[in-house]
Amino acid sequence: MRTLLGGGWSIKLSGAWTRERTRDGVTTWRASGRMMRVSPGSPWRCADGADIIASLDAELPPDPVGKVGEEGRDGVGHRAAWLYRQDGDVFTLYGYNFADGTYLETVFISADMADPSWAFAAWRSVARSAGYRG
């Protein structure tokens, strides 16, 4: 099901997700054994994509088990993600989607490190409405 996230952004989520709260611009969603936090990023009109990725990389925790960068689609210019393993089988995927001088941060958390594919699929499903200008 495609879910609206605000600011022209949407995401496709599998299963039953419940929107819990928004605090300080961060919205939390939950499904059985899974959590997602969504927040709009700051405008970055004065920096290029490589500078933004380097800045995010410096702000995120060290030692990810994987990093991905790729071209976007559906109104997204490009995407970047960092995957972390924490406390045994818990994983966290920090995903970023960039479009029109702004970005959307999505953080996916699950206790099943054996199957992070759902988080990557959700991150890749993020879309931005054509012509959205807030």
Image (cartoon, grey):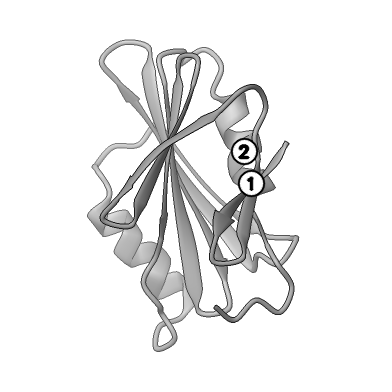
Residue lying at 59% horizontally and 36% vertically, measured from the top left? 120
| x then y, percent, for residue 55 | 31, 66
In the drawing, what numbered circle is on residue 35?
none
For discs 2 and 1, the disc positioned in front in the rendered view: 1
Residue 82 sits in which quadrant? top left
Residue lying at 33% horizontally and 59% vertically, measured from the top left? 56
- In the rendered image, which quarter contains the C terminus? bottom right
Q: Which is nearer the N-term, disc 2 or disc 1?
A: 1
Q: Which residue corresponds to mark 1?
A: 11
Q: Which residue corresponds to mark 2?
A: 122
Residue 108 sits in which quadrant? top left
Callout 1 amino acid? Ile
* Badge 2 vs badge 1, beta-carbon distance below 8 Å: yes
- Under circle 1, the secondary element is strand
Using residue 78 as the reference point, say whether residue 129 is left or right of it: right
Give whichever of 23, 56 is nearer the camera: 23
Callout 2 amino acid? Ala
